Image (cartoon, rainbow, N blue to C red):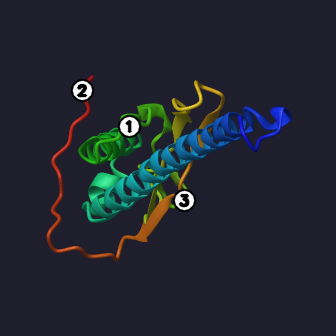
Amino acid sequence: MIGRDRREQGTAAIEMVLVLVFGMVLLAGMVLFGRLTMHMIALEKAIGNTTRIVATLPRPMLTAENADLTMPALGARLVRDATLSAGLDIQPRASSIGVLCEEMYCGTGVATTMVSVSTNISFTDTVFRNAYTATIMPASGSLPLSFKYSELCAIPFTVAP
């Protein structure tokens, strides 16, 4: 080659490989962070909506004798419905969804003035081939029972034996 030193041949190819590798890792990281953020936002909205629905239920439903079974089942159904409608491919396990009244299980006979819902999902990385598993745990939603939302009504709900 005219005007090039023999020692510099191939440096452009090496630079291109380095830039492409860095660019691909950066792109994969952006895709992973985007998925993680999408799951986090959808889970927070699901918790917020579930909390709002449970807070508008009649108080006898929250203090009923079997409320410690019906409220977590209702919360699990509502959170899963919301995450499915958001298009999430990772769903929270029913056992990870908690509905509490006054920081205790509903139906404990305590006068209920606050309802909170919490959940989490285990997010396994598919971009970097399961290099790690992260737990997405948004802040749990809490609402006082004086909260009113006119478009929501009590949802008839029974737990299958």
Dot 2 falls on a residue whose secondary structure is loop
Under tag 1, what secondary structure? Answer: helix
Asked whether the beta carbons under mark 3 and mark 1 sit within 8 Å of each other, the answer is no
Residue 65 showing in the rendered view: no
Query: Gap in Å between the C-alphas at discs 1 and 2?
Result: 10 Å
Q: CA distance from mark 3 to mark 1?
A: 23 Å
Callout 3: few (<14), some (14-19), or many (20+) C-alpha neighbours within 10 Å?
A: some
Frontmost residue, 67 versus 49: 49
Residue wearing tag 2: 160
What's the distance in space between the residues labelled 2 and 3, CA to CA?
30 Å
Horizontal arrangement in the rendering, residue 36 relative to residue 43 (left or right): right
Residue 93 location (% of width, % of height)? 44, 32
**Within 10 Å of the Cα at label 1, are there few (<14), some (14-19), or many (20+) other Cα atoms?**
some
Q: Is residue 134 in sight in this rendering?
A: yes
Q: Position of residue 4 (x, y in %)?
A: 77, 41
Residue on which disc 1 sits:
69
Q: Quick one: which residue is furthest to the front in this view? A: 2
**Which of the 4 quarters of the picture holds residue 128?**
top right
Q: Nearer the viewer, residue 121 or 158?
A: 121
Q: At 27% from the left edge and 65% from the top edge, which residue is drawn?
A: 56
* Tag 1: amino acid: Leu
Residue 116: where, in percent of width, then height? 46, 59
Residue drawn at 15 percent across, 62 percent down: 153
Mark 3 or mark 1: which is in front?
Answer: 3
Q: Quadrant of residue 29?
A: top right
Q: Please name the amino acid that badge 3 sits on.
A: Ala
Q: Which of pointers 3 and 1 lies earlier in the amino acid sequence?
A: 1
Which residue occupies the foreground of this view, 134 or 44? 134
Mark 3, residue position: 139
